[in-house]
Image: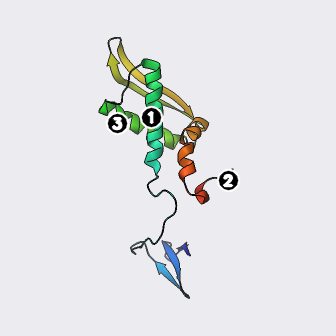
Amino acid sequence: MSQIVKKPDGHPAVEVENGNKIQQLTPKAVFKVKSTNGDTHLGGEDFDVVLVEHILGEFKKETGIDLKGNHIAIQRVREAAEKAKIELSCTQQTEISLPCITADASGLKHVNVKLNRSQFEALVQPLVQRSPAHLRPLQ
């Protein structure tokens, strides 16, 4: 068992129970991971990818243009998706707006997608289900 404690100097440390003694590890200590739980490859980028796919899908539905081969456009969408994900952690709705993402014979095309928190939660629900049970919110 381990816990994070505050040292007398105010800096954090980790106390690890090791048999009958408690060892205090400082931030410079080296930790050896002996076990993990759940999908160890699941992370924030997975949530970004889901959001990027949603934005690309909405754009294609609206314009008929598939941006998947446009690496610059994908990078802009990825950055906007990460920003939107962060915004949705403290607001109920966000707007993803990327002017001049591409052009066709009729002119410039722009990404304008509104996304609320409940839509985002529905999109990432499969990822949440992959997380260990003790990390999921109570339902």
Of tags 1 and 3, which is closer to the observer?
1
Pick the residue in front: 20 or 64: 64
Name the residue beneath numbered marker 3.
75
Outermost residue, top side: 106
Q: Position of residue 71 (x, y in %)?
A: 30, 33
- Residue 16 lies left or right of residue 29; in this view the side is right
Residue at disc 1, secondary structure: helix
Q: Earlier in the sequence, mark 1 or mark 2?
A: 1
* Image coords of residue 85 (percent x, y): 50, 41
Say which label, 3 or 2, has the lower sequence index. Answer: 3
Q: Amino acid at mark 3?
A: Gln
Q: Residue at x 39, y 24 (%)?
A: 99
Where residue 103 appears, as percent x and y from the top left, is 33, 19
> Disc 2 designates what residue?
138
What amino acid type is highlighted by mark number 2? Leu
Task: Give the mark nearer the N terminus: 1 vs 3.
Answer: 1
**Residue tagged by mark 1?**
53
Q: CA distance from mark 1 to mark 2?
A: 28 Å
Q: What's the amino acid at mark 1?
A: Glu
* Pair 3/2: label in front: 2
When the figure is inspected, residue 23 is found, relative to residue 62, above or below; the finding is below
Q: Circle 2: is it few (<14), some (14-19), or many (20+) Cα within 10 Å?
A: few
Query: Helix, strand, or loop for circle 3?
Result: helix
Q: CA distance from mark 3 to mark 2?
A: 35 Å
Depth check: 13 or 18 in front? Answer: 18
Proximity of marks 1 and 3: CB atoms separated by less than 8 Å: no
| Vertical side of 7 occupied by 70: above or below | above
Q: Residues within 10 Å of mark 3 (few under 14, many from 20)?
A: few
- Name the outermost residue toward the bottom: 20
